[in-house]
Amino acid sequence: MAKHLQSSLPAAKLDDAMTAKIAGDIDGFLDSSKSFRNRGLRNSDEPDFVFSPIGASNHD
Amino acid sequence: MIDNAMAFADIGELGAAIRAKRVSAVELAQFFIARLELVGPKLNSVVTILHDRALAEASAADADLAAGHDRGPLHGIPYGVKDLLAAHGGPTTWGATPYRSQVFDKDATVVARLHDAGAVLLAKLAMIELAGGMGYNQADASFTGPCKTPWNTEYWSGGSSSGPGACVGAGLVPFAIGSETDGSITNPSSYCGITGLRPTYGLVSRHGAMALSWTMDKLGPMCRNATDAGIVLNAIKGPDPNDATSLANRMTAMVMPSGPLRFAKVKGAEDKCQPEVRKNYNAALVELAAGSNVAEITLPDFPYNDMVGIIIAAEGGAAFRDIIDDGRCKTLADPDGRRGGYSNLVAPAVDYVDAMRLRAPMRQAFASIFEAVDVLVSPTFSTVAPPIAVSFDKSYPGFSDGPLITACNLVGIPAVAAPSGFGLHGLPTSVMFVGPALSEARLVSVAETLQSKTDWHRRRPPLPA
């Protein structure tokens, strides 16, 4: 994924050293995924945000 | 000529001086601007002084009062804001090199409300770049340099509301507005020896504030004492049609519990604290709850750090995608911040959604705690301010903060941090009070009780050399 970022964001000019560090950061995210896998969330557990077809500011 | 003692007067004392005509709002503004100019550079705590705007607002405050139009307790009182709030009259830099010349020709809602209350905006104050949203591991994480606590300038002010903490602590402004996503009001309040109030999520409009995390950002007062924090909160809270997350009026009044308050400690909260932090925390508990039983609760089991990490990464990555994509984030001061945005771009979306799914049961778990407890008490942070010259991960090995601040920010409940004494290197320590959503009046009252029995909040730092 870090290599993909390096090639897909040419304006960012990510060199190989920084790309390697970004790869390490991404590994950290993937490690923390275990926390969420182990929580036993069910299909009915909804996220704590709500889409509104009329816009949230129209609710009172 | 204004006495230098006025620099540390609270809002009530300053307001009384204005109404008694011992000082005018213009004189007060000029006095604090002179202090910002003299001391601000020594602390790296000021970004922009808004001379013209300040004198115009102060003159108007004097004219209003002369005409019999008193706007209330903040009439003529000077203040500063963290430089992530839009205010006409100067740039709004977000503390970050890519935005140094950014200008908004409008006032954030909190700035407009303080204007309506008669307060006088003097300056935009330093902050950690992008409120730390790209990550940081050192005090030198802003284009204004490392902000210093006035108590010992070898040490950090805290962040990300660094300038508000340092400027209030040093008597450069009577109060300031900071922001907190995950500790950014409570941390500098602790390290600078002042009283900070992080409101319930949605109680204070964020319209005109830099967004780091739409589901976690809050704005709140940083003041000399708890009474001042309550005064400022009253002026800035309330619904705002420009902020879809602001709470409706009907939700902003909470009744104080009848009878003695039920305090509870958080299990393990003092285990990894510096000894002075622990001693001062326990002394504060004795002052507050003498003779009554203090319960102990165990925080519910949730992956707090992983949750806050993925939420801030995903929302912050989206908020600052422009400077990540085009590489401008590589001009940030902190090496971690220069690259943090790139991993944020690929933060797992499923984990973000799962973190948001966990916030509902977490909210329910905290609501259960507050059925049996009125106020949670904890050391605000486990250590005094870290040294500027050392990265955070190496500054105080063996000591670490518990998850309470992160948990409460995820749940969106309020806290007041108040000075509890002093520790290593003559630096302040702090105690924190946490309550259920919309319990700000209760928390202010608890901190006022502590401050009626102690004088830590009245101590003054030396003027930096």
Image: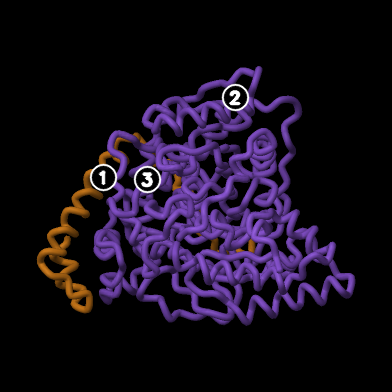
Chain colours: A orange, B purple
Q: Residue at x 40, y 32 (%)?
A: B273
Q: Quadrant of residue B399?
A: top left
Distance from disc 1 to disc 3, alpha carbons, whole Å, reads 24 Å
The residue where tag 1 is placed is B394
Residue B286: which numbered mark, if any?
Answer: 2
Q: Residue furthest left?
A: A16
| Place of residue B417 in the rendered image (x, y in percent of width and height, measured from the top left) | 55, 43
| Place of residue B100 in the rendered image (x, y in percent of width and height, measured from the top left) | 41, 77
**Vertical comparison of B215 with B63: above or below:** above
Say what amino acid the circle numbered 1 marks: Lys
**Residue B462, visible in the rendered structure:** yes
Q: Earlier in the sequence, mark 1 or mark 3?
A: 3
Q: Residues within 10 Å of mark 2 (few under 14, many from 20)?
A: some
Helix, strand or loop under label 1? helix
Asked whether, in this view, residue B387 is left or right of residue B178, the answer is left
**Residue B363, visible in the rendered structure:** no
Chain name for mark 1: B
**Vertical comparison of B339 with B435: above or below:** below
Helix, strand or loop under label 3? helix
- Do discs 1 and 3 share a chain? yes
Q: Earlier in the sequence, mark 1 or mark 2?
A: 2
The quarter of the picture where the C terminus of chain B appears is bottom left
**Vertical comparison of B337 with B292: above or below:** below
Chain name for mark 2: B
Chain name for mark 3: B
The residue where tag 3 is placed is B307
Q: Quadrant of residue A10?
A: bottom left
Say what amino acid the circle numbered 2 marks: Val
Say what amino acid the circle numbered 3 marks: Met
Distance from disc 3 to disc 2, alpha carbons, whole Å, reads 34 Å
